[in-house]
Amino acid sequence: MDNCGKSFGKFILLWSGELVSSIGSGLTSFGLGVYVFQQTGKVSAMALVILLAFLQSLLLSAPSGVLADRYDRRLLMVIGDSLSAVGLVFILICMMRGEAQLWQICVGVTISSVFSSLLEPSYRATVTDLLTEEQYTKASGLVQVAGSAKYLISPIIAGYLLTVSDIKLLLIIDICTFFVTVGSTLAVRSGLKSKKSEQTKSFISEFIDGWEAISEKRGVLVLVIVASVMTFFLGFVQTLSMPMILAFTNSSSLGTTETICASGMLVTSVIIGILSIKKGYVKLLSASLFCAGVFMVGFGLRQNIVLICVSGFLFFAMLPFANTCLDFLVRTNIENSVQGRAWGLIGLISQLGYVAAYALSGVLSDYVFNPLLLDNGALADSVGKIIGTGTGRGTGFLIIISGGLLCVTSLVLYSLKSVKKLEIRGDICTSE
């Protein structure tokens, strides 16, 4: 390989640590979601915890991106991963003294989120440090395998553990995974040159450089905005799927269902990792988003566990295609020297959709759609004939609406010429 310092082996080591960390995070996320919903009976309370679990990390992702370009990216990952365990320890201590209050859980997840903000920009930029452009799509598939572990492996493990123990065990396991993640990051760091901070520009100037890297090509900016719209709709699924399923089954069945659904992401992520995507990124991106919207509609259609599993599996199977295409089109159109700053801003903008979804979904579910589908009003009579009425049907209806809007978004995206132009640059990079 002509590119010195590019090592797929080191990437695999780093990726392995992130895989373990993802499984641990998934255990905590699942456990806290079930715990809060069962304690309060409110979707909005669960949505609040989900929101706080990543809001601080989201708001700090842009300045964290500047730090990733200024300082040693691997060291930032170690610091962020280690200190993010503090919030989990706080929640664990509160639970050992009795039932943890909602505000205590909110404080804990906020603390953890603050330090986790150092991870994502540094991790993405490190992937660029380690790999060649030809390896990006293969690496993207593997990264998504690690990311999907919190949905694929964690739920079924957490569902089982909650039947024999309680959420405290899940928190302890998650805390222990930080040792593995930090160890793998330090091992990768020992084989790379530490980044020296030049500090020739102010923090604000470097922040602006990141924005210019995104905005100088209209297509890149459009993709980032589309990603934000996409996460808005996906946020409804992430928030509402758990209470929708718990409305007619238990936590163990919920864990199994989530695992089956998320296995779709695993299957296509592995396929992408083995075969890679060579061309047609924009077309594949639009098609995968459209299909994902269709399967979201099926996911919320009925209180039928088989339909939910099939639709959920196919929905998650579409996401790696969309994520890989987005990642490639953006990555190959931004200079490596500003990738940390750029990915920090991209993370901030694209995930604003999650913020809006978490803020709205619980409130809409608890106070608008669920009451409407429990009453004998006109909406319950007309919509109820198709999707049914009763507990949890309002959440299903919201997921159906989100799926339809995602289909519309995919059609708009495919018609944009500025996005199609990005693929020309991607083809050049692949052939070089």
Image: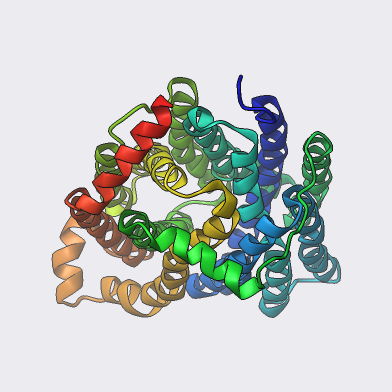
Instruction: Pick the quarter of the image with the C terminus.
Output: top left
* Picture residue at 40% right of the left edge, 70% below the top: 361
Image height of 34 relative to 150, above or below: below
Picture coordinates of residue 275, whole percent (x, y): 43, 21
In the image, residue 397 above or below residue 56? above
> Does residue 34 appear left or right of residue 290 in this picture?
right
- The spot of residue 170 in percent (x, y) is 74, 51
Q: Nearer the viewer, residue 350 or 375?
A: 350
Residue beneath the point at 71% across and 77% down: 101
**Quarter assignment of residue 91:** bottom right
Work out whether residue 240 can be spotted: no
Give the quarter of the figure containing the N terminus.
top right
In the picture as drawn, the residue positioned furthest to the front comes out as: 200
Which residue does the image show at 18% across and 72% down from the upper left? 379
Residue 258's place in the image compared with 8, above or below, is below
Could you say which is closer to the camera, residue 317 or residue 389?
Answer: 317
